Image (cartoon, rainbow, N blue to C red):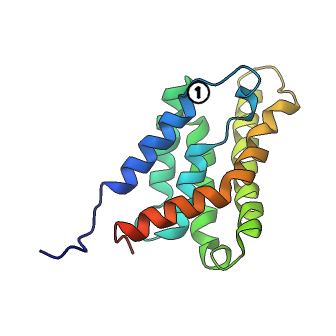
Amino acid sequence: MSEFRERPWIIPLTFLAALMLTVVPMPDWAVPYRPEWVAMTVIYWAMALPGRIGIGIGWGMGLALDVLKGAVLGQHALGLAIAAYLAIKLHQRIRVYPLWQQAVSVGAMIALHLLLVLWIYGITGHKAASWAYWGPLATSMALWPWVFLLLRDLRRRCCLR
């Protein structure tokens, strides 16, 4: 056997880590700024492996996030499926950008995801969110370069092409 064998369990492991980071306890002041770990992970894998990670994976991770957060079933699924679609459609453009421009593009996808979630909150009769609702957008954009580099290194080490 070759030492460069593909390890298909790496992608589900990163999604599991993203779900775990979503519920890890944080100080009260930091909770409104919790990054969108699952969205960043879905976007990365959709851009890196558009033939393997698609809209269905985005939908499934969104459903898992809905269950984890106790949200309306399909609320996060819609946002993540659309973010995955955009990442797949634009992956050839976004991948050649410098990391700071990638962060802006990923921020636009996460903003759309958050906007769709907020829209569904409004439809279901929840009160309007404050400006702190958009805190995860800023932290996700700020962390994107590190998330990108970490996942890219992991993908290259595990021979996922």
The percent position of residue 27, horizontal first and vertical second, equals 68, 22
- Which residue lies at the image location 58% right of the left edge and 27% below the top edge? 72
Q: Residues within 10 Å of mark 1 (few under 14, many from 20)?
A: some
Number of numbered labels in the structure image: 1
The percent position of residue 6, horizontal first and vertical second, equals 27, 68
Position of 12 relative to 105 (above/below): above
Q: In the figure, residue 85 lies in which quadrant?
A: bottom right
Q: Residue furthest left?
A: 1
Say if residue 121 shows up in the picture. yes
Horizontal arrangement in the rendering, residue 72 relative to residue 93 (left or right): left
Observer-nearest of 103 and 127: 103
Position of 1 relative to 7 (above/below): below
Q: Which residue is mark 1?
A: 72
- Which residue lies at the image location 67% right of the left edge and 78% below the top edge? 93
Horizontal arrangement in the rendering, residue 97 relative to residue 153 (left or right): right
Q: Tag 1's secondary structure?
A: loop
Q: Residue furthest right?
A: 131
Observer-nearest of 135 and 72: 135
Q: The residue under label 1 is which amino acid type? A: Val
